[in-house]
Image (cartoon, helix red, strand yellow):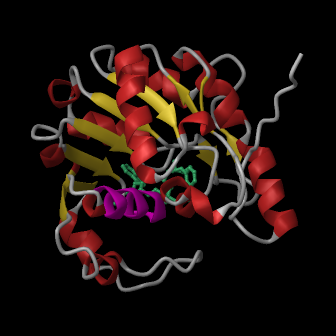
Amino acid sequence: MKFAVLGTGMVGRAIAARLAQLGHETVIGTRDVDATLARTDTDAMGTPPFREWQQGVPGVALKAFDEVGANAEIIVNATSGQASLAALEAVGTAALAGKIVIDIANPLDFSNGMPPVLSVANTDSLGEQIQRAYPGARVVKTLNTMNASVMIDPARVPGQHNVFLAGEDSAAKATVGALLADFGWPAGAVIDLGGIRAARGTEMYLPLWLSLWGALGTGDFNIAVVRGQH
Ligand code: NAP
């Protein structure tokens, strides 16, 4: 299939590389292609400059947000949560209409330093904001509750652990579920939480995720939901 992955950070890169490895035609979206390719710094998380990463995945093209949507069958939102609506606006309403939008973003506001706070919570979520802004899009919230490396390689965490789906469109969720299987997620690991409103809970888990990251000293962990037999 043809994928457009919005986001040049560690999530966009991880997803794009995995999609390309699986044989999907994949482009990455950014604000400004020249500016992204001109970066030379490794960021605070140790993420190397985009150009350096791209040399290892020659099949993945980098394009501006407003150029990636038209040809894509599925769009992945892996942009900063504070910027996701702006990035999707640049992709354009027409390019998003009828498409599955896999939303991995979390509405984390780092403007007052660490730890970040949620910019939307309780009565709304970023996933719902995206679905409301683009009613023609088929938004599926998923993968936002774990580190980028676990998203595309769940075996990094031993045993049975879980990934969530939330969205209004059952067929879209089935397509995304099949993609998760290709990423290595066993069928029993995928929990469909229902409509896009359930994005609230998955996004509000992030403060706990951040505390666990600090306590465990690694991002290689995940939620394992254990169900009683009664
Ligand atoms: P990030 O640093 O959160 O986001 C990078 C992307 O956001 C870049 O493509 C950047 O565009 C875009 N962006 C930043 N400001 C923008 C603006 N004003 N307008 C338009 N676009 C803008 O990268 P990340 O760490 O890969 O995370 C991506 C998303 O996944 C986030 O929402 C994050 O909360 C979520 N998430 C991350 C992890 C993880 O392991 N890091 C795990 C779960 C969920 P340019 O390409 O132009 O710079």
Picture mark count: 0
Seen in the picture, residue 211 relative to 90 is either above or below; the reply is below
Q: Is residue 136 left or right of residue 78?
A: left
| Magenta segment, prevailing SS (helix, strand or loop) | helix
Residue depicted at x 24% and y 75%? 37
The one of 17 and 65 positioned closer to us in this rendering: 17
- Check the image and report above or below for 215 versus 92: below
Q: State left or right for residue 210 relative to residue 64.
A: right
The front one of 8 and 219 is 219
Work out whether residue 63 can be spotted: yes
Q: Quadrant of the N terminus?
A: top left
Residue ID at (47%, 83%): 42
Tell me residue 122's x, y (percent): 72, 21
Query: Which quadrant of the view contains residue 88?
Result: top left
Q: Quadrant location of residue 117?
A: top right
Residue 216 part of the magenta-drawn span: no
Q: In the rendering, at what x and y percent does residue 229 appear?
A: 86, 22
Q: Is residue 181 above or below residue 54?
A: above
Q: Nearer the viewer, residue 190 or 37?
A: 190
Q: Residue at x 53, y 53 (%)?
A: 151
Q: Residue at 29% x, 39% y: name it.
A: 75
The image shows residue 76 at horizontal and vertical percentages of 35, 43
Boundaries of the magenta span: 9-19
In the rendered view, tell whether residue 64 sits above or below residue 188. below
Seen from the viewer's position, the closer of residues 119 and 26 is 26
Query: On the picture, is 190 further left or further right than 18?
Result: right
Instruction: Using the rendered image of the protein, determine whether residue 8 is visible from the camera's viewpoint.
Output: no
Considering every residue shown, the one lying at the far front of the view is 229
Q: State the quadrant of the C terminus.
A: top right
Q: Position of residue 61 (x, y in %)?
A: 17, 64
